[in-house]
Amino acid sequence: MNLSGHTKPFAVLGHPIGHTLSPVMHNAAIQSLGMDAIYLAFDVAPDTLISTLNSMACMGFRGVNLTVPLKEVAFKGLKKLDISAQRLGSVNTVEFLPGGHLKGHSTDGKGFLIAIKEAFGKTIEGLSVFVLGSGGAGRAVAITCAVAKASNIIVADIETKRARRVVAEISKLLPRSKVQWLKADPAVWVKECRKVDLVIQATPVGMKKADAPLLPPSAFRRGQMAFDLIYMYPETVFMKAARKSGAKTANGLGMLLHQGAISFSIWTGIKPPVKTMRNALEKQVYGRILSS
C-alpha cells in the first residue's frame, strides 16, 4: 500500500475499537482495486462522536463505519438520514457529502439477511425468531426480521425497558407484526428460546473469551438455527452452547462482510470485491480461507 498526499481516508469508529476486523476487509478491497486509499480504526467516546465526524468531514474523510456503542448516538445526532437508518433507528455507515454534510445509513439489516441466507440456506420470512439484546445491533436485527416477515419475534434483554421500547417501535412501524418482549428472567428466556426457529445473539457478551454465555445449552434444541453477531472467533461461547444441543450455528463474519460491502458501495460507487474481502476475513479469524 503506497500512501501519498492524495490518499483517501476511510475509518471505523467505536468505543472500544480493538476488536474490529473492518480494516482487514476494507484494506483488502482497496488494495485489490488499486485505490490510493486507506481504512483506519479510531476509539471515539459517544459524547464526542458528532464533533469528531464533523472534523473528519473537514479533514477529507470519504466514509466512516460505526460500531458499538455509537450507532444510536449517530442516529440521534445526524440531521440527514437515509431511509434505512430511519427505519432501523440506527446508523452504522456515514456518507460524507459535498459541503461537509453528513448522511447516516444502516447497512446492518441487508447484511444480516444475506448472512442468514448464506449460513442456513433460508430467508427470515415465516421463521419464529428470538433476539437476545436490543441495543443498536439487536434493535436493527429485530426490526429487520419484522420487515422481512418473520412469523413471530421475541426480544429479550437484561434491560427490560430497552426490550419493551424496541417491541413498541416494531408494533408502531408494522402493526400486524407478532412481537413480544420478555422480562429479564433467564428461566423464562430458556423456555421461550427453545420454541423458536432462529436464535440471534446480539449482545457484547462473548467478545471476551472469559465471558459465560447468557443462554445455556438447555435453551436450544436440535433443528434450530443459532446466529451470533460476534465475529472475531471461529466459535463463540454462544455457538458452543447451542451446538451442544444440536443447533446449527454461525458467527457474525458474514454479516460483517456484507454490511461492509454495502458501505463500500455507498462511499465509492464501486462494486466491491466481496470474495477478496471474505478471504481476508476468513484468513484472519480461521487462519485459512474456507470459501472456494
Image (cartoon, grey):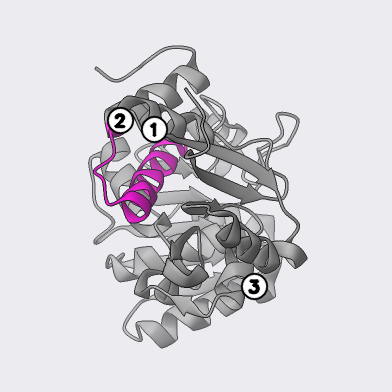
Relative to 134, residue 63 above or below: above
Question: Any magenta on residue 266?
Answer: yes
Q: Residues within 10 Å of mark 2 (few under 14, many from 20)?
A: few
Give whichever of 120, 144 is nearer the camera. Answer: 144
123 left or right, relative to 280: left
Residue annotated with mark 3? 162
Q: Are marks 3 and 2 in contact (CB under 8 Å)?
A: no
**Residue lying at 31% horizontally and 83% vertically, measured from the top left:** 176
Task: Tell me the amino acid under the disc marked 3.
Answer: Arg
Q: CA distance from mark 1 to mark 3?
A: 38 Å
Q: Are marks 1 and 2 in contact (CB under 8 Å)?
A: yes
Task: Tell me the amino acid under the disc marked 2.
Answer: Leu
**Residue lying at 46% horizontally and 50% vertically, measured from the top left:** 199
Residue 192 visible within the image: no
Q: Residues within 10 Å of mark 3 (few under 14, many from 20)?
A: some
12 left or right, relative to 94: right
* Label 1 vs label 3, nearer the camera: 1
Q: Secondary structure at mark 1?
A: helix
115 left or right, relative to 12: left
Task: Tell me the amino acid under the disc marked 1.
Answer: Ile
Query: Percent x, y for residue 39?
Result: 52, 38
Query: Percent x, y for residue 132?
Result: 56, 56
Magenta part of the chain: 248-274
Residue annotated with mark 1? 30
Which one is earlier in the sequence, the residue at label 3 or at label 2? 2
